Image: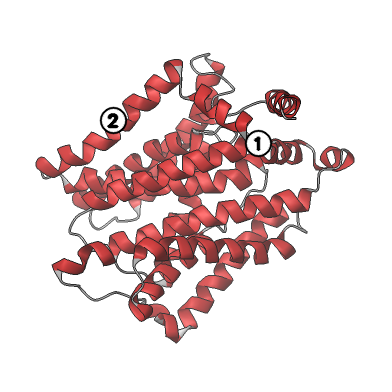
Amino acid sequence: MLSVMKMIREQLTGVRGFILLVVSAVLLVLPVVFWYADLPFPANTLFLCLMYAILAMGWNILAGYGGQLSFGHAIFFGIGAYVTMILMLYFGITPWIGIFVGGFIAAVTGLGLGVPLFRLRSHWFTLATIAALEIFRLVFISWKWVGGAAGLQPPIVPPELSLYYLQYAGPFIYIYIALGILALEVIVLHMIVNSKIGFYLQAIREDEYAAMSVGISPFKYKMIAMFISAFFCGIGGGLYTIRFRFIDPFAVFDLITISVYMVVAGILGGMHTFVGPIVGSFIFIPITEYVRAQIVARFPRYYGLHVFILGIILAIITIAMPEGVMGWLEEKGIVSRKIGIASFESLHKGDESHESASP
């Protein structure tokens, strides 16, 4: 534990710490600027960037570090969204608690799905996650207690209960909530990635049989990665619930706008890097929102055209940067290959020094 805390302090010093300080300051100031300038569109885009950064980072633990490419993570997003809404609507439980309960229920669901899914490998695993997502979507469409196809929407509460139920006008308050959740996720995942769990996941990703030969249990660590990944995606779903105050199975269990978007954000930023999913989210989401808004405004009869144009833009970016933005920056020597990732050797030395210091 001491070695992990030491590595976190090392990550926050020097140029890296300065960049983190500048980025944090900008993110803290931007919502205020948007509020005073009355700019709801960029404010809402910033919220979506933060939400998808939370989702993509959670997804990346399983896919980028564990090597398990899932297109079904909208399952956990949807469960987190529904649990948060149901606790608030039916039981009067504040979303401050409901979001994390939703994340936990999503994580437990991930463990249940992991038992059969991790028997599959490669593209069979990926296809199975898509099939599982469709099953969940159909179940929630038919489940009347959770609103069925019509979805759920909480009533408008009086101003004195706004803090309890997190009902505010505009995206500004929710930006800071999302920023706080993302900061918490970064700290937790940084500790995990720079621990032996992170090393074992990378070993499994590179060669599962070689990992087994040295005593690493692929199933055990895949399940750990699934739990962590599903937990943060579930929290992202709860965040969606409090921001938009309406959910239905078509929105929260959507293959494209939830699962594929978080996958694209992770791949675009760099799957095998720690900050790649955040970088990818802050590139992909603004492009998506801008293109969609422009197409709807200029060509309302061709609403689906924005998807086609977005695909062309992403194809160009991925051809130019096959390893993602962070991979490209590493190749150019602009950032270190070890950014956000500790080597196993440093961990091992840290453990040895800690053990030798102990009586």
Q: Which of marks 2 and 1 precedes in the sequence?
A: 2
Image location (x, y in percent) of residue 227 = 61, 56
Towards the viewer: 352 or 28: 352
Kindly identify which numbered label has been placed on residue 25.
2
Left or right of 205 on screen, residue 341 = left
Query: Which element is circle 2 on?
Result: helix
Amino acid type shown at disc 1: Ser
Q: Is residue 308 above or below residue 332?
A: below
Q: Quadrant of residue 30?
A: top left
Image location (x, y in percent) of residue 187 = 49, 39
| Residue 321 visible to the viewer | no
Label 1 and label 2: CA atoms lie apart by 28 Å
Kindly identify which numbered label has been placed on residue 195.
1
Residue at horizontal 48%, vertical 39%? 186
Q: Is residue 184 above or below residue 338?
A: below
Left or right of 331 on screen, residue 121 = right
Kindly identify which numbered label has been placed on residue 266.
none
Query: Which element is circle 1 on?
Result: loop
| Residue 32 visible to the viewer | yes
Residue at horizontal 28%, vertical 52%? 174
The furthest residue to the right:
213
